[in-house]
Image (spheres, coloured by chain):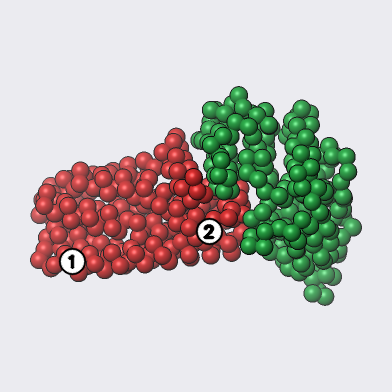
Chain colours: A red, B green
Amino acid sequence: MSALTAMLIRDMRIAVRVGGGALMGVLFFVVVVTLVPFAVGPDLALLKRIGPAILWLAALLASLLALDRLFSNDHEDGSLDLILMGRAPLELVVAMKGLAHWLTTGLPLVIAAPLIGLFLNIDADAEGALLLTLLVGTPALTFIGMIGAAIAVTLRRGGLLLAVIVLPLTVPILIFGVAAANAAVIGPVPFGTPFTILCALTLASLVVGPFAAAAALRQEME
Amino acid sequence: MRLSAVELSCHRGGRTVFTGVSFAVSSGEALTVTGRNGAGKSSLLRTIAGLLRSAQGRLTLDGGDPEMSIGEQSHYVGHQDAIKPSLSVAENLRFWAEFFGERSSGDVAKPLAAVGLDALAGLPAAYLSAGQRRRLSLARLIAAKRPIWLLDEPTSALDAAAQSRLSELMRAHLATGGLIIAATHGPIGLDQTLELRLDQAAPAPVAAEASA
């Protein structure tokens, strides 16, 4: 097995074991979305109109929740030193860590979304499109977020700094994710345009994220 | 293989940790780095590992793989043990063996037996004692082959039996042409070692800063 698959499997294993935090994000997501109808009231038309935005906001905050542990755990126990001494390119190792993080925290959100879409009066037809926007958009949240996680790695309790760094960068993803989801749920604008831009943002973040995070980690280790 | 440093110096947080450190270690030799607390023993090891940038000086490795940095050919055992509490002892070791590019890594029984942890292979690492954690991180040294061992106080938390086992491992490593640099306060159980004392190299920090 190569160094990269070893890293992927190890990170996923840690995430799903006790104290790994894989379920924390999805639980937070479900709780926030479930509370909205209680707060807003049983106005189905209103819920339908704000539904996509609520789902996206909850997904954004939920994926931010576990992000500060992405590198800081490895930093605290010395694993990061050894990772830097590995022969695999740091950019790819970081990308693998991002992938493992998305598979254990992002993907469960996407899977839970159709179920809790019911709470927000989203039609069965629109559910598919909404699911697609989350499936495409959440990797971008992870890979943009890893830049902040790498910058904040040497700080104790860097979670707040992480949020301040990452949230502005995620605004474009939020805008086009919600726009595409709204187009599918409410119409009448076409779904394709904002969705294509969302795809482009994700592809760009998959490239920029690992390189920026790796550069930040190398710098921080000084 | 020969690792040599010329006039190495290191600054951290605006303070000079050490300056003018020179040494040379060849295959089959061990160098012990001694000095008071804060003399820069750990910083020196981290500089060699490539985890700290040296301010001045040169660090060269003759006879190694020219495609790889010194850090990529080194093992580093520091104060932090890089052990994940939720993974089992065997899983922890297998990950590092695979990450360090060891192809035949399915079998971690041998390195675990070499440090006397084979009976605990399936136990979550959270239940290990300090000495057992130390032994698990030392098992990395044999689970993946790398010619340079950088050991930061390798004997800390080890009992007498484990210490003698460690010296056996070090002797075997030296016999196969490896080299060891160990920061230590006490004897590490090797007959012949080169010694580097960092106290003598430690300068007056303020004066050095001003002239630099």
The vertical placement of A205 against B86, above or below, is below
Instruction: Classify residue B7 by image quadrant.
Output: bottom right
Q: Residues within 10 Å of mark 2 (few under 14, many from 20)?
A: many
Residue A54 seen in render? no
Q: Which image quarter holds the C terminus of chain B?
A: bottom right
Q: Residues within 10 Å of mark 1 (few under 14, many from 20)?
A: few
In the image, A16 versus A148, the foreground residue is: A16
Residue A124 seen in render? yes
Q: Which mark is residue B153?
A: none
Which of disc 2 and disc 1 is earlier in sequence? Answer: 2
Q: Secondary structure at mark 2?
A: helix
At horizontal 67% and vertical 62% (from top left) the residue drawn is B66
Q: Position of residue B119 (x, y in %)?
A: 60, 24
Residue A71 located left or right of residue B145 = left
Q: Position of residue B136 (x, y in %)?
A: 64, 36
Which residue in the protein does label 1 denote?
A192
- The kind of residue tagged 1 is Gly
Which residue in the protein does label 2 denote?
A90
Mark toward the viewer: 1 or 2: 2
Q: Which image quarter holds the N terminus of chain B?
A: bottom right
Q: Secondary structure at mark 1?
A: helix
Q: Position of residue B41 (x, y in %)?
A: 78, 52
At horizontal 17% and vertical 52% (from top left) the residue drawn is A128
| Chain of the residue under the numbered disc 1 shown in the image | A
Q: Position of residue A113 (x, y in %)?
A: 23, 47
Instruction: Classify residue A31 by image quadrant.
Output: top left
- The lab-note entry on whether marks 1 and 2 share a chain reads yes
Residue A192 located left or right of residue A15 = left
Marks 1 and 2 sit apart, C-alpha to C-alpha, by: 35 Å
At horizontal 40% and vertical 52% (from top left) the residue drawn is A99
In the image, A180 versus A163, the foreground residue is: A180
